[in-house]
Image (cartoon, rainbow, N blue to C red):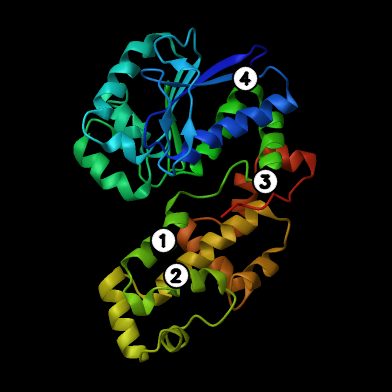
Amino acid sequence: MSDRTIHVALLGYDGVQTLDLSGPLDAFSSANALRPGAYATIVVSLDGAPFASHAGLRITPDGTLRDAGRLDTLILPGGEGLRLPGVADRIAAGLRRTAPGLRRIVSVCTGIYGLAPSGLADGRRATTHWSFAADVAARFPAIRLEPDAIFIKDGPIYTSAGVTASIDLALALIEEDFGPRLALAVARDLVVYLKRSGGQRQYSEPLRFQARAGHRFADLAAWMVDHLDQDLTVEALAAHTGVSPRQFNRRFKAVFGASPAHHVETLRLDAARDHLLGSAASIGRIADAVGFRSDDAFRRAFDRRFGLSPSDYRQRFTPIHAAKSGDRHAPAQPH
């Protein structure tokens, strides 16, 4: 645990994802409000010139990466601009120059497109946004990509999944630097989980479903997530989309490669994991909230999928410091 100020630079460029940049900044700012002097943060660019995020936010950096002074941590946010010709190579060269003086290099989301060409992550485990995982794996086979992780630490290299995972990773850095008490306080201040359960697959699956669905299924993914406690049989889902049960079942399997029942169970179990770690509700109440017919049916499905009971999962994965403090009510997760 550190008792010094940790110097962090975030490297920006035209087309950066706004939240990839602002999320960690807000987390470190919250840490400073709770523990003055914890972090000294600056925003830099390669040439020191102002840049615009993909959303159009104009940002004036504090200076250049080369002149940033002694740094502990360098964070590379993701963004569409990083995937333009030549940009990643220039940023990769900047990372290679700066790396010897750094304790940590952090890639957020598609920031891996700037990190990977530097060679600094070769042979290491890493992750990125689920929708870019296949492309990254094909283009940079020397990286051991794990596409379902929220964030990964492998030596001095830290990588995270998409957008809001930048806050998950920033909280992990704060916990590493100053301990779980400050990290939990920052999580409460930002109204996010300190540690989300599972991998990014549970967050991306409804989006993946919606993106691949035709117009008749367009709103089905979000509707299912919002109605897990209701009747989600093939007959009910078919009625919701206006097709026959046989046609619905056939089209669903053809498009998504899984039966409707399996997909529904996945959504319910992932929601149950969030409830188990984010509330003190009983197993029975959680089973009912996510649509299982009985406690026993919930326990059997959970054990079949994850290899342990809901109670064991809660005991094993609830953060120890939160359990000891008696605070079993995690703050709400943002959407």
Q: Are marks 1 and 2 in contact (CB under 8 Å)?
A: yes
The tag earlier along the polypeptide, 4 or 2, is 4
Q: Label 1, secondary structure: give it.
A: helix
Q: What residue is shown at x 36% (from left), y 17% (from top)?
A: 47
Question: Does dot 2 land on a helix, a strand or a loop?
Answer: helix
Q: Percent x, y for residue 251?
A: 29, 80
Residue 35 placement, left or right of 197: right
Q: Quadrant of residue 327?
A: top right
Is 161 drawn above or below residue 250 in the view shown? above
Q: Position of residue 77 (x, y in %)?
A: 42, 33
Residue where numbered disc 3 is placed: 191
Q: Residues within 10 Å of mark 3 (few under 14, many from 20)?
A: some
Observer-nearest of 248 and 323 = 248
Residue 273 in view in this figure: yes
Packing grade of label 1 (10 A; few <14, some 14-19, many >=20) is some
- What number is the disc on residue 39? 4
Counting from the top left corner in percent of width and height, residue 79 is at 37, 39
Q: Is residue 135 left or right of residue 78?
A: left
Q: Amino acid at mark 3?
A: Val
Q: Earlier in the sequence, mark 4 or mark 3?
A: 4
Q: Residues within 10 Å of mark 4 (few under 14, many from 20)?
A: many
Label 4–label 3 contact, CB within 8 A = no
- Residue 322, percent from left and from top: 72, 41
**Which label sits on residue 221?**
2
First-in-chain label (1 vs 2): 1
- Between 283 and 260, the one lying in front of the other is 260
Quadrant (top left/top right/bottom left/bottom right) for the C terminus: bottom right
Q: Which residue is mark 1?
A: 207
Q: Residue furthest bottom?
A: 244
Amino acid residing under circle 4:
Tyr
